[in-house]
Amino acid sequence: MPEHETAGQHGSPAREVGDFLRRRREQIAQRWADTPLFRTVFTVSRDEAVEAGKAVVEALAAVAAAGRVEDAEADGFTVVREQLTRTAAARSRAGAGSAQVSNEVDALRPPVVDLLVADLSQASAEHVRECATAATVLMGTLRLVVMESALNEGRALIDRQRMELLETATPVIRLWDGIVAVPLIGTLDSARSQVVMETLLESVVDQHARFAILDITGVPTVDSLVAQHLMKTVAAARLMGAECIVSGIRPAIAQTIVHLGLDLGTVVTRASLADALAYALDQQGSGIVDPVSRGAVAR
Amino acid sequence: MQTAGCVDARLPIHSDMDLVWVRQHVRQTAAQLGFGLVEQTKLVTAASELARNTLVHGGGGEVEATVLRNGHAPGLRLAFIDEGPGIADLERALSDGYTSGDGLGMGLGGARRLVHEFAVDSSPGNGTTVTVTSWTVRPPRYREEA
Amino acid sequence: MTHAHTGPPWGSVPVLRLGDVLLVTLQGDLHDSTAEQLQQDISETIASSSTTGVVIDLSGVEMVDSFLGRVLAEIAAKAGLLAAQTVVAGMRPAVAITLVELGLTLPGLRTALSTEDALGLLAGEASPYRPRGTRRESP
């Protein structure tokens, strides 16, 4: 064995690992197909498992060739990121916890290192050690990429559910022909206001509603921010050809509004939802008339 | 943490027609990335405003569109670049209601409200670059801003 | 009536005359120059004919920016000077929300949910419902 042989002669360890991965793609994929991770994800076809494995090995080879074995953001991973996400998601749906998935990905390392060391049987111990280290780091990075993908998938799911929750919590009621109302309950942060505004305006189109009532009876505090959100909804409805009425202005709220000097513009306000409905009906020309026998007057 | 992509598309802004192409490109890309309809509309409108500024005040230029993937939710970054005279009074340009006198300019403040991130790099004689970014899911803010 | 002087045919804006009212239907994406030409054409038409109303149908429009917003406001202003009323109809929710966020609430502009409502508005009715008793003026 030539003693003057240096790592430089073989190229850097990372590049060596890249070459090795390309060379041994088939064998590695074959060994991976029998690991718990691939067996549990690709339950129908082993060939499919092997194909998937080969794609991952290719990606790892690209990352190694670029000398980025420690970089989870390396471009080489882009090609297989979606596949890895699906794999992690599949394991998660099957009930595997993240620690378990992490271990399963880790189990992909020994076949790679074993084959690598076997391939480098003619090289110096030093070189073998360097390459094995590079391969180990690379497999660790792969594990990181998988766990990160799983995490992002989880966060995306939470986002979707949060939106669905917001939307379900914002029921728009059709009070009459051409009159819709949305009872606002709880605090109105900007995310919630957006959903309320969008839901209400969609309903204005669907119901062909000339009047939209925003009932704030269930809103604990009205500050300048809440007022701003309300005014935006009013302005947008106006642009569409509908008139907003804000109801549920109880004395305490009225006081706050005056005290803070909040400008509600020309928006019509009413103390109760019923009053707002009466106003809208009146505007429509469908006023409420109490029975004459009671002696009451038309509102 | 954020994967800054390289520029995915570069569109020229030298005519009325170019504004249409810019709007179409932004609309299509935003739709593909999964932006909701309202967010799409806001982004396309902002792009229209800024592209027009580039055309009218910057003497023409280009927009660079980059798709961003920070893993969680994809985003779209648009950089409007011109080699024009630059903005002398940046603060005023960012405040609402500002026009440059010929009635065709719109305060940058308006466009700023339509996007999630906004940055201007401009000074007299050095051209202007306005960079805006929006995400399909808005990153949480720690303080409620008016 | 209005044809784009530059660009593809879809820059043309269809205009219908319904009695004394002009119905302008904006579709898709409008060139700046097409919008400006439209403004001019409408003014000329109002001046040269007995037109008391203009309805601008935005139901096919996916985006209104400050330029188009200003054109709409100017159309209404010029029409007003020529004794014609303008109503903007059918604005989509996403467009309305964006305009408001931009800071363009177009306060002087009359609006309606649909072209039918707009025509009703111009004819002097507040809504599709027939008023009982005295006729109500539209707000």
Image (spheres, coloured by chain):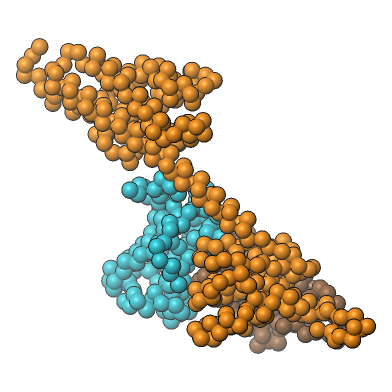
Chain colours: A orange, B cyan, C brown
Specify whether residue A132 is in view.
yes
* Quarter occupied by residue C56: bottom right
In the image: residue A271, left or right of residue A105: right
Which one is in front, A86 or B118? A86
Q: Is residue C12 above or below residue C82?
A: above
Specify whether residue B16 is in view.
no
**Number of marks in the rendered image:** 0
* Quarter occupied by residue A239: bottom right
**Quadrant including the N terminus of chain A:** top left
Residue A76 coordinates in the image, percent (x, y) = 34, 35
Residue sitting at 85 percent across and 86 percent down?
A297
Which one is in front, B53 or C125? C125
Residue sitting at 43 percent across and 47 percent down?
B72
In the image: residue B116, left or right of residue C79: left
Which one is in front, A281 or C33? A281
Residue A41 coordinates in the image, percent (x, y) = 49, 26
Q: Furthest residue to the left? A: A4
Q: Is residue A276 above or below residue A163?
A: below
Residue A5 coordinates in the image, percent (x, y) = 9, 19
Residue sitting at 50 percent across and 50 percent down?
A159
Which one is in front, C133 or A68? C133
Residue sitting at 46 percent across and 31 percent down?
A96
In the image: residue B101, left or right of residue C41: left
**Quadrant including the C terminus of chain A:** bottom right
Residue A268 coordinates in the image, percent (x, y) = 66, 81
